[in-house]
């Protein structure tokens, strides 16, 4: 059995080394049977030019956790080049940040992972999830109403983004500390390095044990007589995963013996299907016309934005010719690819898709907003879809000022409208002057008291521009950006470059020679 397991592992390892050419491996080892089996598999088989390092997070949730740390530190194989342990005050972090113990522990672990890899592209965090964990994950996602992404389960290779501000907060409050010493008399705690924190913005996780069953790993550690630790909390069915592992999955396996393998195959099949879907969507002629404005402005550390403009130069959506199912699938894939850690329920997906489909047919000048998570929200205005995530805000807090979103996302809004409107900030990027301005004319933004004349059959009436704009479907934050043509030192407007004003005298100042 050990030879068969090693053969499976070598297949995963060789493919990984060939494709990724890693220089450093950080194995997250708890001392349990899964991570201990992975430790010795790596120690025996990892090419010598690749650095093998071990990190351990001491969660301080169980009395025996301290002894488990000492046991692991004293029994590492000689192949390990560096051992880094972290003390995580999960209870304090959960209490102070209003998180569950599970979420708090996960965030502290991820901060430790990012700290160890230090922003190095060729450094990977190796995790010991196996086929049984994959089956549990897929079942859990199905029960919670997940979409296609959830059916993929755990990815064998995945980059996780972390916010340096979050890691700094964790450091400054002392929630995560470095631990040294292999016994109680030598043990010391120290603060995280400030210089390393600046690079703690991501880590890439590699999970080579996903094709292997839990029972295979147990047989391996017993055959090698490895002294592993047992986490008694894994046997508490109060936790969702434990309930699936201890009660639901055994019942399914008893009736359907290959449940774990079949669920793993399902996850792999769905993942391949979604990869093919992404390719087909990326090469669809209509979808290619969608403008991705996500890079319109520089973001602060930890922030992420998906900004998609479905507005064409003729003021009609290029998306409406596609079936609704294709539009919704495209949005779902864009969300997942930009925010892989954002887990949305099917209800949330449906709300997003419903709101967006309404906006495609009936664009609204008012900002529509859906809070997806306390640090992530969706904005919809006209035909601009914007998903914004920031560790600096708590969008679900009652005192949150929504006007901050207008200011924060202003450039995305301006880029969205610039394709059909010459605006103060960016008209030169999309238009050019078709001739010289008359000496008595000027091109400027709107001012208080601006007016224009409306000619009727029998009279000429003066109308204030502000009155017109209040009745238009143009968002108010855009008004100061609009260009107008007027006489110098006059409030009388000859032209506003806003295409819906069809009754105004046409002045051919700007050309539609777009530089897109």
Image: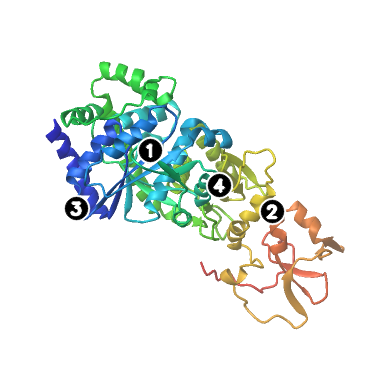
The residue that disc 2 covers is 475
State the residue at coordinates (39%, 24%): 233
* Mark 3–mark 1 distance (CA, rounded to whole Å): 34 Å
Mark 3 or mark 1: whose residue is earlier in sequence? 3
- Packing grade of label 4 (10 A; few <14, some 14-19, many >=20) is some
Q: How is the image coloured?
A: rainbow
On the question of residue 261 being in view, the answer is yes
* Mark 4 or 1, nearer chain start: 1
Q: Inspect this view and state whether residue 210 appears.
A: no
Provide the residue designation for mark 1: 185
Discs 2, 3 touching: Cβ within 8 Å: no
Identify whether 499 is placed above or below 43: below
Structural distance between the alpha carbons of marks 2 and 4: 27 Å
Where residue 287 appears, as percent x and y from the top left, is 45, 52
Q: Report which residue position mark 4 lands on.
A: 391
> In the picture provided, is 211 more to the left or to the right than 201?
left
Image quadrant occupied by the N terminus = top left
In front: label 1 or label 2: 1
- Report the disc number at residue 398: none
Q: Are marks 2 and 4 in contact (CB under 8 Å)?
A: no
Q: Nearer the viewer, residue 468 or 504?
A: 468
- Choose mark 4 or mark 1, whichever is in front: 1
Please tell me which residue lies in front, 453 or 267. 267
The CA distance from mark 4 to mark 1 is 39 Å
| Residue lying at 52% horizontally and 49% vertically, measured from the top left | 168
Q: Which residue is mark 3?
A: 48
Q: CA distance from mark 2 to mark 3?
A: 61 Å
Mark 2 closeness class: few <14, some 14–19, many ≥20 residues within 10 Å: some
Placement of 247 over or under 396, stated as above or below:
above
């Amino acid at each position: 059995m050990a030879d068969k397991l090693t053969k499976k592992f070598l297949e995963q390892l060789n493919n990984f080394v060939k494709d990724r050419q890693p220089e450093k491996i950080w194995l997250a080892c708890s001392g349990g049977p899964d991570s201990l089996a992975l430790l010795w598999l790596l120690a025996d088989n990892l090419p010598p030019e690749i650095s093998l390092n071990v990190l351990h997070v001491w969660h301080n949730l169980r009395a025996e956790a301290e002894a488990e740390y000492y046991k692991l530190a004293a029994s590492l194989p000689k192949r390990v080049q560096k051992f880094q342990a972290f003390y995580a005050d999960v209870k304090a972090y959960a209490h102070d940040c209003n998180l569950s113990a599970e979420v708090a522990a996960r965030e502290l672990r991820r901060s430790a992972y990012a700290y160890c890899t230090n922003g190095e592209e060729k450094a990977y965090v190796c995790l010991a999830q196996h086929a049984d964990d994959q089956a549990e994950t897929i079942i859990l996602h199905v029960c919670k109403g997940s979409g296609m992404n959830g059916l993929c389960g755990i990815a064998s290779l995945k980059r996780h983004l972390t916010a340096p501000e979050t890691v700094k907060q964790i450091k400054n409050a002392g929630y995560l500390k470095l631990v040294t010493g292999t016994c109680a008399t030598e043990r010391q705690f120290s603060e995280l390095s400030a210089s390393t924190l600046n690079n703690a913005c991501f880590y890439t996780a590699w999970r080579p044990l996903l094709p292997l069953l839990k029972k295979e790993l147990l047989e391996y550690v017993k055959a090698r007589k490895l002294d592993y630790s047992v986490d008694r909390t894994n046997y508490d069915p109060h936790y969702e995963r434990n309930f699936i592992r201890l009660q639901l999955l055994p019942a399914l396996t008893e009736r359907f013996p290959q449940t774990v393998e079949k669920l793993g195959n399902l996850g792999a099949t769905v993942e391949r299907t979604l990869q093919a879907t992404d390719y087909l969507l990326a090469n669809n002629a209509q979808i290619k016309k969608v403008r991705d404005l996500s890079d319109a402005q520089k973001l602060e550390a930890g922030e992420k934005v998906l900004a998609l403009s479905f507005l064409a130069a003729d003021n009609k959506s290029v998306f409406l010719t596609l079936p609704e199912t294709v539009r919704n699938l495209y949005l779902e894939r864009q969300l997942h690819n930009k925010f892989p850690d954002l887990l949305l329920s099917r209800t949330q997906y449906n709300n997003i898709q419903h709101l967006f489909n309404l906006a495609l047919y009936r664009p609204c000048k008012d900002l529509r907003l859906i809070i997806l998570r306390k640090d992530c929200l969706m904005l919809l205005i006209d035909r601009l879809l914007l998903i914004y995530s920031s560790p600096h805000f708590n969008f679900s807090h009652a005192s949150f000022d929504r006007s901050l979103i207008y200011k924060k996302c202003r450039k995305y809004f301006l880029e969205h409208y610039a394709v059909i409107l010459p605006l103060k900030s960016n008209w030169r990027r999309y238009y050019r002057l078709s001739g010289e301005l008359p000496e008595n004319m000027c091109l400027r933004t709107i001012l208080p008291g601006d007016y224009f004349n409306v000619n009727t059959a029998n009279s000429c009436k003066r109308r204030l521009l502000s009155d017109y704009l209040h009745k238009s479907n143009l968002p108010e934050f855009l008004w100061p950006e609009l260009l107008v043509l007027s006489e110098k030192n006059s409030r009388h407007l000859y032209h506003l470059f806003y295409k819906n004003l069809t009754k105004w005298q046409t002045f051919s100042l700007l050309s539609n020679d777009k530089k897109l």
